[in-house]
Image (cartoon, helix red, strand yellow):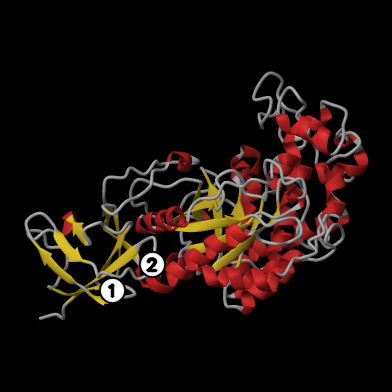
Amino acid sequence: MADPTPPSHAAALHTIREVVASGPHQDTHWDCFDDYQIPAWYRNKKLGIFIHWGVYAVPAHIGEWYARLMYLGQEEHPAYQHHVKTWGPVDQFGYKDFIPLFKAEKYDPAAWAALFKESGAEFVMPVAEHHDGFAMYATDLNRWNAAEMGPKRDVTAELADEVRKLGMRFAVSTHRAENCWFFNAGTEIPSDVQDDRYRDLYGPCLPREIGKDKGHVTLGQTPGQAWLDDWLVRTCELVDKFRPEVVFFDWWIEEACYHQPLLTFAAYYYNRCSEWGIRGAINFKNEAMPRTAGVWDLERGQLKDIRYPFWQTDTSLAYNSWGYVEGMKYRTAPALIHDFVDIVSKNGALLINVGPRADGTIPDEQQALLRELGAWMAINAEGIHDTRPYKIYGEGPTTVPEGTFAEKDRQDFGPQDLRFTTKRGVVYVHVLGWPDDGVVKITHFHKNRRFLARELQSVELLGHGPVDWVRDDQAMKVTLPAQQPGRHAWCLKLTPGPDR
């Protein structure tokens, strides 16, 4: 930026300081958030829709990181050669040249919202700005935005309106923190990244550290105060424009240079939420924030056991990309539903991503998966909504790989894999496969084990009704009906009798 503190930023920073000073949360230390409480609706509903949609959908190759990989050079990544062959040299056709091709001519936010509602989701979270620096909303702070270029529509505001009309909650994700280095490889080969006319898109391009992590993000320096102020102002502007009930940050926000700006943002956002009478949440990864100051997010991964406090997995309908690409490798409906149940049984939520095409259409395969999830929720939501983890998450032979990006090692669940949830004294047993003999065996609830405070009154299969059951020394055995109600996973409702 030519002027390190432009007038618009100076005024915005003044407002930010006022909001922080006047609200219940201060930005002096993370201890100021010790009284933070995760919104009840978030813990109760547990399902959100993530949306990666932007200029990167035009090349539809590799994914949303194409914007970076296309500049890495032919010796570093095949995306460079693909780009040169398909679009031309990067000094003649750079990432900015995709923007006029990003037209969103078939974008129908009402249809999107209806699909997301059908899936059973409680909140919808588009990526308002990805690492590429192109804002998907009308911003007063950058000309590179969807309202002025490409679609020439505030596609985020349109979606927010439609989502809220259907009673869902609106959230936003911003990955702007990464923009300061995202295009830096373009400074090392002839490219349009070196043209200062596009600096407000490509960012400062902090140099890569020579000889270390050449293709990724090991940097030779950190962004200065002007950049950090700009990040804070833009992120607070996003909050004020959309009043989101969740704000999601990607991983680079944990860098030391962002510690104070993130602390200030948290105070600003939570103070605004208090002012507006809403409960908000910040999603963060790794150790960017204390895990009591927001909702910790585990990217493309799960946990082996119950975790307190409440947490979240963000993952995609496709294993190979977040944004739309040709040749997406989709998960199956059973895999999606089984992972969701596993996450919920361990006190988590699922944020599942869709990747629309550049024209604004959501591929049929993605729509089908969301509808399958919705059909399952229509029968089994009682065992998900408003529930909490049982004493143990469940039982079964299938091992769940733990950690970020661990889903690549996931195994399919089967009929012996059971997951437990509970509410108001009722225990729900989610069966992740229909047993061949039609009998569910719950070894944890065998005859000699007291698992309810009162005698068991009934066992029902959601979507069907009462079912027969017995308990012996090995297990509780539930006989399922001949006809399966729904598909992919089934939920038994174990209800205790009245107090005596």
Query: What amino acid type is highlighted by mark number 1?
Result: Arg
Dot 2 amino acid type: Ile
Q: Is residue 415 left or right of residue 296?
A: left
Is label 2 in a helix, a strand or a loop? loop
Confirm whether residue 206 shows in the render.
Answer: no
Looking at the image, the residue that sits furthest to the top is: 211
Dot 1: element: loop
- Where does the image place residue 395, in percent across and percent down from the top left? 25, 51
Residue that badge 2 annotates: 384
Residue 398 visible at all: yes
> Residue 18 is drawn in which quadrant?
bottom right
Between 76 and 43, the residue placed more toward the observer is 76
* Mark 2 residue crowding within 10 angstroms, few (<14) / some (14–19) / many (20+): many
Q: As displayed, is residue 335 above or below residue 481?
A: above
Percent position (x, y) of residue 104?
Answer: 78, 61
What residue is drawn where x is 74% and y is 48%? 56
The answer for how far apart the CA atoms under marks 2 and 1 are is 13 Å
In percent of width and height, residue 65 lies at 69, 41
Foreground residue among 13 and 444: 444
Residue 403 numbered mark, or none = none
Q: Is residue 439 left or right of residue 88?
A: left
Is 429 drawn above or below residue 225 in the view shown? below
First reached walking from the N terminus: tag 2 or tag 1: 2
Position of 500 compared to 428: left or right? left
Q: Residue at x 66, y 61 (%)?
A: 362
Mark 1: few, some, or many residues within 10 Å (few <14, many ≥20)?
Answer: few
Q: The C terminus is located in which quarter? A: bottom left
Contact? badges 2 and 1 (CB < 8 Å): no
Task: Measuring from the top left, give residue 24's x and y in whole percent.
Answer: 56, 65
Quarter of the picture holding the N terminus: top right
Looking at the image, is mark 2 or mark 1 nearer the viewer?
A: 2
Q: Which residue is mark 1?
A: 424
